[in-house]
Image (cartoon, helix red, strand yellow):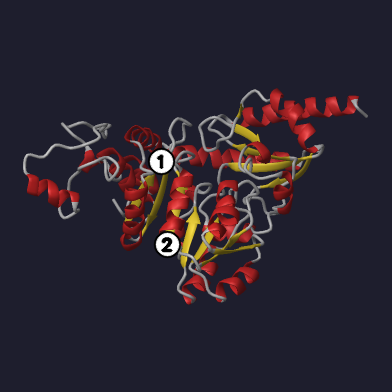
Amino acid sequence: MEQAGSGTKVVWAGEKPFRAFGATQVPVVLSVAYDYDDVDEWYETALGNRPGYTYNRMDNPTVQAFEAKIRTLECAEAAVAFSSGMAAISSALYTFLRPGDRVVSVKDTYGGTNKIFTEFLPNIDVDVELCTTGDHDQMEREIAKGCKIVYLETPTNPTLKITDINRLAKAAKAVGALVLVDNTFATPINQNPLRLGADLVIHSATKFLGGHADALGGVVCGAKALTDKIYHYREINGATMDPWSAYLILRGMKTLKLRVNQQSGSAMEIAKFLQSQKMVEAVYYPGLPTHPNHDIAKRQMHGFGAIVSMVLKGEMEAIKVMLPKLKYANRAGNLGAVETIYGPARTTSHVECTLEERQILGISEGLLRMSVGIEDTEDLIADLKQAFEYLESKLEQHV
């Protein structure tokens, strides 16, 4: 299975040991606890000295099947699942950080992650240095000063900036730092950070892995020596993935490659279309040759992903006019689903941030993020075209 292609892995990896009664699908095991006649056997299982289950906060067969599948896709030794993407991110950070430690990251991380860096970690005396995203020289200088963790998100949410994982992983290794990469936007279909030198890779499984906007989850993958520590943190702090969510995400992952390939292909065509629209001030998509780090994206990604961000002239007023006119669109705070989803940064990725904080991060009030779904490409472009025509007509009436 390790040598199979990603399209085969998403269907078969990790499941067979967890099937029951000859079923072709992994069952949803909802039992909170597990029965033992032999107290010594129960005790040894609870200590982790023999395989088995005792309590769902520790382990669950359905959740473990999901962990086995994503572990295989990310070429990792092990994986630990969580109740949400932010639970995975925060747990990974808090597992390894102590007062007096230092983190080097980028300014353009997801809004919730940014809040951990700017609000929560400083409260426990962890020093955080946020560098200009894409300024690799600055990051290397800061890493060289010493740090415990280098945290990367590439592509970033929602500005689609790219960071050279391999380059910064080498800098981190030189000072003994761990490299954590949020791979949610790329997915394991388009990028494998562990192969580029990262130590841990993180996903919000709510997004592309599940793909159907019906289950929350997160996961951290990496070497077992590291994930064992993260597992212990989860075991005690309790942000465990629900088995029903694990089942839904497992089911969704079977079509992950098909979905991502369709979505990425559409996103490329839509990004090109947006460049020709007079109401669009800027287009952010790493697949465009005009993207400042297009060469890095080509080198470390297998595809450029399903997220396209645009900056509209007229900013929030233009967004308010245009959004209601889109037919093939969910206007919601999510991404990675089979349906196309639109949302401005101020109500989605950076709703936790103030206007001033978003401005410091370089996020325009006119930024509109588009999570491209699996619909026919030509229909999505036609939908955008009619919405832009309506927007232009409305603005002309006010001139």
For mark 2, does the 10 Å Cα neighbourhood hold few (<14), some (14 to 19), or many (20 or more) residues? some
Q: Nearer the viewer, residue 272 or 327?
A: 327
Spatial distance from mark 1 to mark 2, Cα to Cα? 19 Å
Could you tell me the amino acid type at mark 2? Answer: Phe
For mark 1, does the 10 Å Cα neighbourhood hold few (<14), some (14 to 19), or many (20 or more) residues? many
Instruction: Identify the image quadrant of residue 309.
Output: top right
Q: Position of residue 53 (x, y in %)?
A: 20, 43
Q: Earlier in the sequence, mark 1 or mark 2?
A: 1
Q: Position of residue 184 (x, y in %)?
A: 50, 47
Residue 96 badge: 2
Instruction: Left or right? Give the position of 393 relative to 274.
Output: right
Which residue position holds label 1?
Answer: 83
Is residue 268 among what the camera can see?
A: no
Q: Position of residue 188 (x, y in %)?
A: 44, 50
Number of numbered discs on residues: 2
Residue 204 badge: none
